[in-house]
Image (tube, coloured by chain):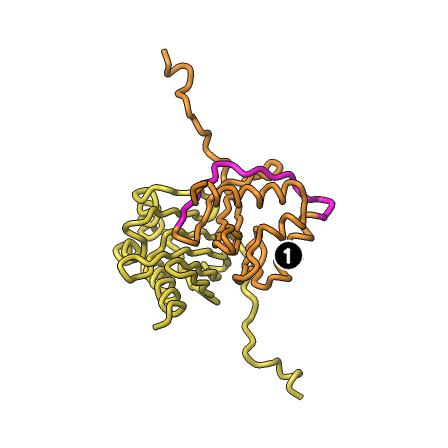
Chain colours: A yellow, B orange
Amino acid sequence: MSDHASVLFANEAFYIAFANKDLEAMTEVWAKVAAITCIHPGWLVLTDRDEVMASWEAILVGPGSPEIFCEQAVAHVFGDTAYVICYEVVDRDTLLATNVFVRESRAWKMVHHQAGAAPPPPVEDDDPPPNMMQ
Amino acid sequence: MSDHASVLFANEAFYIAFANKDLEAMTEVWAKVAAITCIHPGWLVLTDRDEVMASWEAILVGPGSPEIFCEQAVAHVFGDTAYVICYEVVDRDTLLATNVFVRESRAWKMVHHQAGAAPPPPVEDDDPPPNMMQ
């Protein structure tokens, strides 16, 4: 699997853990050696591992835990570090996320997540619209 | 100069270019070889160099170009890649930013910027408050 594909796989694991409200899987997503940071929408930055994990516990196990879908993820890889930009569709809202990963013990692990409000993602047109095909 | 200091210097150059509304300096801040991406608050992600630079031109030369101050910047360095988290104080609003840098030709260059709304940064207390010193 290419580094790009592996990074996107790690990014997908983050959103699967989020969607499944699986705190154990979410804990696995994050780096164990490197320091981690997290910026939830409208929050102060969290810079302590216990604070980051407590925030995910509050989000995932809370009664209002939202449905979430990741769309249009694109990975940018620089050796053993990478970042992914993707849209997050949460209920009727859209967010844009920056997710930073580093390679730890041969696996890509998240070291930073920031999400903020964004317009709906543009429609992905693989084919030209019908009126352009004539 | 340590890598941490060099990365913070590059981050500072970004905010000085922003504060001075200096498009030429802003252009210098960004990577020339690597692909670049940018997420302004409430915008779609910009993934094309011309789009990113056009956005900065619009922001910097526009009549409503805001005052901006960077506070509490912290760098996280991973070899030739790094990211900085910092607060941006813009008029009366506060944003939190993720700025990603890579080393290009021995200089740290920005490859990604995301800023989103945040609460005011916590007060940095180097000294205990007066009533705690008695």
Q: In the orientation shown, which residue stands out farthest toward the right?
A: B63
- Relative height, residue A67 to residue B77 (above, below): below
Q: Point out residue A133 in the picture as x, y percentages from the top left corner.
A: 64, 86
Q: Quadrant of the C terminus of chain A?
A: bottom right
Extreme residue in the top direction: B134
Q: Nearer the viewer, residue B51 or B63?
A: B51
Q: Which residues are magenta?
A: B61-77
Residue, disc 1: B53
Where does the image place residue A85, in percent across and percent down from the top left? 47, 60
Identify which amino acid the numbered label 1 is placed on: Met
Which residue is drawn at the image coordinates 62% and 44% (left, top)? B18
Q: Residues within 10 Å of mark 1 (few under 14, many from 20)?
A: some
Residue A44 in sight in this render: no
Q: Residue at x 52, y 61 (%)?
A: B34
- Image mark 1: chain: B
Q: Closer to the camera, B124 or A128?
A: B124
Q: Quadrant of the N terminus of chain A?
A: bottom left
Which type of secondary structure does the marked residue at label 1 adopt?
helix
Q: Quadrant of residue A78?
A: bottom left
In the image, is residue B67 part of the stretch drawn in magenta? yes
Q: Is residue B110 magenta?
A: no
Which image quadrant is residue B126 in?
A: top left
Where is residue B25? Give x, y as percent.
64, 48
- Residue A98 relative to residue B49: left or right: left
- Residue A59 is left or right of residue B24, and the answer is left
